[in-house]
Amino acid sequence: MSQQSLTPEYFDSLYTADADPWKFETSDYEAEKYATTLAALPKSRYRSAFEIGGSIGVLTEMLAERCDSLLSVEVSEMAQQQAISRCQALSNIRFQLMQVPQSYPDEWFDLTVLSEVGYYWCLEDLQKAQRLMLDHLEPGGHLLLVHWTPYDDYYDNPLSGDEVHEAFLALPSSQLKHLGSDRAEKYRLDLFERVGIG
Ligand SMILES: C[S@@+](CC[C@H](N)C(=O)[O-])C[C@H]1O[C@@H](n2cnc3c(N)ncnc32)[C@H](O)[C@@H]1O
């Protein structure tokens, strides 16, 4: 098992080999998961949302319909260029190349989405990212996690999807309230609300 977070070069090499390595554009599984992801959002509209690891922008484009403003960050320029092109008609999305948790936007959000990214972090980076996500989420703001759970298929990943979600469930409920979960055959989803500052 790898102990380091996966690097931007790792993801660039995936996108070099295949412009859509996870088949986000065409897979029925992904389409169902995206519909479940959007349906899990308690509010019809968010003021300022943050998407970590937006990839080629398929979920980004759908999320943008629910947000006044959406910031989508990504480590792979190759992936983000596709996202920019896909979403060029949507003026409420900002794109930035950014490696979380080494960098984080200096902004407050009322929604943060971490979909299929957390297991690429080592435990230390996951913990740093958790702190940053909490510190930049408004009280009452939502945090939505969605991750693939069959661990053995993706042996490069330092963590499993379940380990990522359990790490958030272990945070004090005085900081992050668990609003609900959904477990499908191959992924899980957990929704949280920021309680206070601390
Ligand atoms: C499996 S894709 C998920 C895409 C999208 N969130 C979705 O659910 O459809 C993971 C993406 O996260 C990006 N990524 C990986 N580590 C990252 C990090 N530390 N910061 C920002 N993006 C990262 C990868 O380059 C990749 O494009």
Image: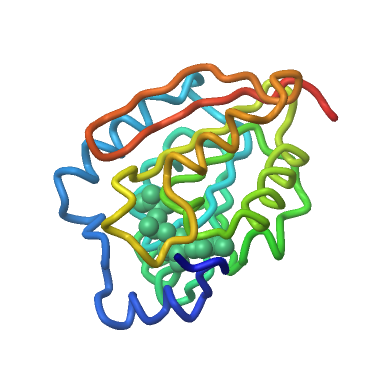
Instruction: Residue 84: name its quadrant.
Output: bottom left
Q: Which is more toward the observer, 152 or 132?
A: 152
Residue 10 left/right relative to 124: left
Instruction: Residue 22: name its quadrant.
Output: bottom left
Residue 59: percent from left, percent from top:
37, 47
* View extreme (front): residue: 1
Q: Which is more toward the observer, 144 or 168?
A: 168
Residue 160: percent from left, percent from top:
43, 49
In the rendered image, the quadrant that contains the N terminus is bottom left
At 46% from the left and 33% from the top, the residue drawn is 66
Residue 47 left/right relative to 164: right
At 27% from the left and 73% from the top, the residue drawn is 19
Q: Is residue 179 above or below residue 118?
A: above
Residue 107 left/right relative to 184: right
Q: Is residue 69 above or below residue 43?
A: below
Residue 29 left/right relative to 33: left
Q: Which is more toward the observer, 43 or 92?
A: 43
At 63% from the left and 30% from the top, the residue drawn is 170
At 51% from the left and 43% from the top, the residue drawn is 164
Q: Is residue 4 above or below residue 164?
A: below
